[in-house]
């Protein structure tokens, strides 16, 4: 697979003019971009991050995210909070506790997946130490009103990372969780490697992929997955190489090709990929900057990732960084969450943005 380079960010400025279109507050205009802060950072809650959005059966949006109260560090105390919106994300109800802290450090990184059976799977991480991080899952059969007891997916020793909004279900029904793992995350000498956990019984039992993916420098990090039209799987990989890397699987995630450069400039930051409804383009959300997590942009591919459109700005300001994007498609919109961290602070707020698919597709 040959992927051409994305154009530089110098071409982005002229696109910004289309980012803020007016619309009625009572009814969502089809071309309006809606943006709100779901969870502003504060002295007592300095970090809101790693969220996901689920659309409930009545159209209500359910947002869930990592809510840190012990400081902004990855190992600080945190639980998982949630909030609901009944007006497409214009306003959000009062946050409530979705998952208490059952780890010695925290719980964090939410993925919400509605399976084809109609059940909802709620994935999150339980962090006990620099050498003990596990992925668990809970299940709801009543549209997120109640949840089963948590089941541990990654049972072997080690530090197992799954980013927010990463679990996917294939056409076959198989559910996949892309994992980045290290023996000890506190030392840079321990490389991170990617592998997949998959389930063929709607998330009740899990198997680990045979292949493990390695990359140079710190290794392969924070993978994301999308199924291609031919049934193959595309994995995008965070690296320290100044761009996204990728790998392919032809057997549903068990075996993977040797990873290589994807041709898309990126810092050491996770990117998010998904398939748009309707025409089926791939949508990539990323930071097109080798050194910083700003700006936040998106590009489209109409040829299954071989080439990408010029990036369009989602967040332009160089006075903040943006990362850990979730992506949910609902009707004619892409629903995003991501953190916003103003430069010079250690405060991370969770932002919501609802973008019309027509805006994403426009030249």
Image (cartoon, rainbow, N blue to C red):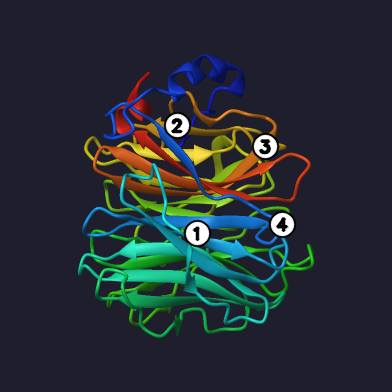
Camera-side mark, 2 or 3: 3
* Residue drawn 36% across the image and 83% down it: 148
Q: Earlier in the sequence, mark 4 or mark 1?
A: 4
Q: Say which residue label 3 marks.
A: 320
Compare marks 2 and 4 and give the one earlier in the sequence.
4
The residue tagged with tag 4: helix, strand or loop?
loop
Residue 348 appears left or right of 196: right
- Mark nearer the N terminus (4 vs 3): 4
Comparing labels 3 and 1, the label whose residue is closer to the camera: 3
| Residue 86 position in % (x across, y down) | 31, 51
- Let me know if residue 252 appears in the view: no
**Residues at discs 1 and 2 in contact (Cβ within 8 Å):** no
Residue 43: which disc? 4
Q: Is residue 190 left or right of residue 260?
A: right
Identity of the residue drawn at 63% across and 74% down: 106
Residue assigned mark 1 = 164
User: Dot 2 corresponds to which residue?
Assistant: 299
Whether label 2 touches label 3, CB < 8 Å: no
Q: In which quarter of the image is the C terminus?
A: top left
Circle 4 or circle 3, nearest the eye: 4
Q: Percent x, y for residue 219?
A: 67, 57
In this view, the mark in front (2 or 4): 4
Disc 1 crowd rating (10 Å Cα; few below 14, some 14-19, many 20+) is: many
Q: Quadrant of residue 171?
A: bottom left
Q: Where is residue 25 in the image (x, y as percent from the top left)?
A: 34, 33
Is residue 131 shown to the viewer in this render? yes
- Image quarter hosting the N terminus: top left
């Amino acid at each position: 697979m040959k992927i051409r380079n994305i154009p530089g960010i110098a071409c982005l400025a002229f696109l910004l003019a289309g980012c803020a279109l007016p619309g009625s507050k009572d009814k969502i205009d089809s071309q309006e971009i809606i943006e709100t802060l779901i969870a502003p950072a504060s002295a007592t809650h300095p970090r809101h991050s790693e969220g996901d959005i689920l659309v409930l059966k009545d159209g209500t949006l359910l947002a869930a995210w990592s809510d840190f109260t012990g400081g902004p560090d990855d190992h600080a105390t945190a639980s998982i909070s949630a909030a609901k919106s009944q007006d497409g994300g214009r306003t959000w109800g009062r946050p409530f506790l979705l998952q208490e802290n059952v780890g010695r450090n925290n719980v964090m990184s939410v993925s919400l997946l509605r399976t084809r059976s109609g059940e909802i799977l709620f994935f999150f991480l339980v962090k006990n130490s620099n050498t003990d991080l596990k992925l668990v899952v809970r299940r709801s059969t009543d549209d997120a009103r109640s949840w089963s007891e948590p089941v541990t997916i990654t049972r072997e020793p080690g530090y197992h990372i799954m980013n927010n909004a990463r679990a996917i279900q294939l056409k076959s029904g198989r559910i996949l969780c892309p994992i980045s793992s290290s023996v000890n995350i506190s030392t840079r000498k321990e490389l991170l490697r990617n592998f997949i956990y998959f389930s063929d019984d709607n998330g009740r039992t899990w198997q680990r992929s045979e292949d493990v993916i390695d990359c140079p420098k710190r290794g392969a990090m924070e993978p994301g997955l999308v199924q291609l039209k031919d049934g193959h799987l595309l994995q995008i990989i965070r690296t320290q190489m100044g761009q996204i890397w990728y790998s392919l699987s032809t057997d549903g995630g068990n075996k993977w090709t040797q990873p290589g450069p994807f041709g898309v400039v990126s810092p050491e930051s996770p990117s998010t990929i998904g398939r748009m409804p309707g025409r089926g383009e791939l949508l990539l959300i990323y930071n097109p900057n080798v050194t910083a997590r700003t700006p936040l942009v998106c590009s489209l591919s109409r040829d299954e990732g071989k080439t990408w459109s010029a990036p369009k700005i989602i967040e332009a300001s160089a006075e903040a960084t943006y990362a850990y994007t979730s992506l949910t498609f609902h009707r004619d919109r892409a629903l995003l969450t991501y953190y916003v961290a103003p430069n010079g602070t250690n405060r991370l707020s969770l932002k919501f943005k609802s973008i019309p698919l027509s805006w994403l597709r426009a030249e």
